[in-house]
Amino acid sequence: MLKTRVLTSVILMAGFLAAVFFLPDVYWALLMLAFIAIAFWEWAGIAKLAKPWRHVYVSTAIVFGVIIILADNIGMPTLQPQVMFYSILAATIFWLMVSPAWLMMRFQIRQPAVLAFIGLVILFPTWLALVSMRGISPWLLLMVMATVWIADSAAYFAGRRFGKHKLAPQISPGKTWEGVLGAWLGVSVYGAILCVSLSLPYWTIVGLLGITVLSIMGDLLESLVKRQAGVKDSGSLLPGHGGILDRIDGLTSTLPLVMFFIYFPTYFLVMESFYA
């Protein structure tokens, strides 16, 4: 199982690095849209949408994504920044206010339409953040994603070796406080290396630890939704990992929020330039 997991990770990493550095912007956006569309399909399955509605759900997300990609070419230059702002804002409110309450209360949402809407709030901003952050700098995107991956790997190995105290046994019995400490330690070392090698301020480490907390929240939320739906994995596309959702759960709660703090201060200046 571990060998399969590692092999899948290596293949994914090689393909991802090639795409993030060499694909033109439009093709990158389309590739990420394809991956997010699969995640939408998996989420629709967890939400127990009837199959015809699953097709409508995913198709709508794809069509809307393509419209955003082509916005400048179809005479809607303000569509991208407006959709970006409100989508990222919705995701930020969800992860900072709704998700903590959901995890603490562990309430179960039985209405497929409500779960489908939540999937939209989670997944669409993730796609927008993947596209926009890479547009700012591929290295910025990699730095944030590497934080999540390092936290996940460090938590996995620390939990296996030292895990005794359960983090959230009724949500995800395999996660432990020792795993969380391992994630923080791994990310702290990673942050220190970044600060020394790139001459970054040391408070950068605090930001990376915040990203780690958010990634754990995303992981726990997906675990809760899957457990309540009676599902072990979101899919079987990635051997050793499960589905796309199982691989990006930590990114759905981190990328949009990082993008919010980057994008929010400049949004009104950008919109003012369109109407000047």
Image (cartoon, grey):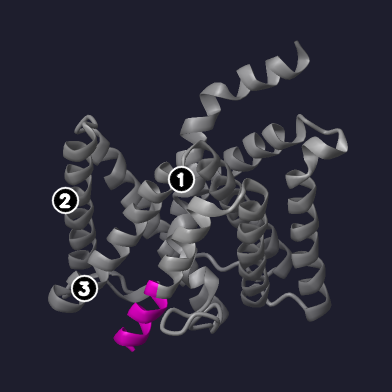
Amino acid of disc 3: Phe
How packed mark 1 is, by other alpha carbons closer than 10 Å (few <14, some 14-19, many 20 or more), is: some
Q: x, y (%) of residue 89?
A: 58, 38
Question: SS of the residue at dot 2?
Answer: helix
Question: SS of the residue at dot 3?
Answer: helix
Q: State the residue position of label 2.
A: 189
Going by the picture, which residue comes out furthest to the bottom?
1
For marks 1 and 3 on the same chain, the one whose residue lies earlier in the sequence: 1
**Left or right: 80 in relation to 95:** right
Q: x, y (%) of residue 201?
A: 22, 29
User: At 80% from the left edge and 56% from the top edge, which residue is drawn?
Assistant: 63
**Left or right: 165 in relation to 221:** left
Please identify the quadrant where the C terminus is shown: top right
Amino acid of disc 1: Pro
Query: What whole-number distance in Å separates the C-alpha atoms at marks 2 and 1?
Result: 22 Å
Q: Is residue 82 visible?
A: yes
Range of residues picked out in magenta: 1-10
**Between residues 159 and 170, which one lies in front from this camera angle?**
159
Query: What whole-number distance in Å separates the C-alpha atoms at marks 3 and 2?
Result: 16 Å
For marks 2 and 1 on the same chain, the one whose residue lies earlier in the sequence: 1
**Between residues 220 and 192, which one lies in front from this camera angle?**
192
Q: State the residue position of label 3.
A: 157
